[in-house]
Amino acid sequence: MLYGHLATSALLHRYTHASATPVMIAGIFPDIIDKTLCYVLHLTSSGRMFGHTLLVLSVSTLIVWLVWGKKVGWSWGLGYFAHLVCDMGGTVPWLWPFVSYTFSPDMLPNIFGKIWLALVNPKLIEVVISIWAITGLTPFIFRSHKMKEQN
């Protein structure tokens, strides 16, 4: 999902005028935290734990806001929140530590759940967002090359 998160962050930068660096870093920050804790340090059982919570979103956004200012903090919060929304195809512990979560591969066993899981398949979403980002950025790239040629 790395490319999907980066594509989403690029779209946020383009259409909301969020600062590029914080929105891009925040767009992958939850995975940097949780995937490192799970797959590198083997401290957690899931790649979606602490970094994928509203608590860490709020605290990190507040810290960024206080250290780097309003626009950077807003861009950080937007990128971070977009990451959590894009990860909704599986279990995201939004309300941890206030709510306990179990991580099982199929949280919705009925037919409607299976349809929902097919529609929010991370690979499908990643492809769609990547295509959207590429087609959305292509006119911008050509326009910038055209402007360079004119100068």
Image: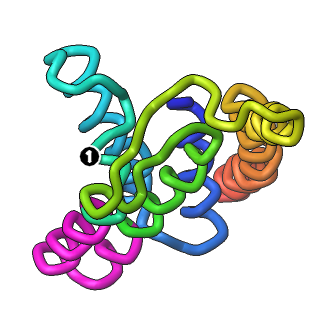
Viewer-nearest residue: 81 or 98: 98
Viewer-nearest residue: 122 or 63: 122
Q: In this view, does 29 lie to the left or right of 66?
A: right
Crowding at label 1, few (<14), some or many (≥20) Cα neighbours within 10 Å? many
> What span is in magenta?
56-75
Quadrant location of the N terminus? Answer: top right
Q: Does the magenta stretch include residue 68?
A: yes
Can you identify the residue that label 1 sits on? 50
Q: Is the magenta stretch mostly helix, strand or loop?
A: helix
Q: Which amino acid does label 1 sit on?
A: Phe
Residue 6 locus on image (x, y percent): 53, 41
Q: In this view, does 9 lie above or below 42?
A: below
Residue 116 locus on image (x, y percent): 81, 41
Q: Is residue 12 left or right of residue 61?
A: right
Q: Does the magenta stretch include residue 4?
A: no
Viewer-nearest residue: 139 or 120: 120
Residue at image position (38%, 36%) is 48
Residue 141 locus on image (x, y percent): 70, 47
Which residue in the rendered view is the most extreme toward the front? 110
Residue at image position (62%, 35%) is 107
Residue 132 locus on image (x, y percent): 79, 46
Secondary structure of the residue carrying tag 1 is helix
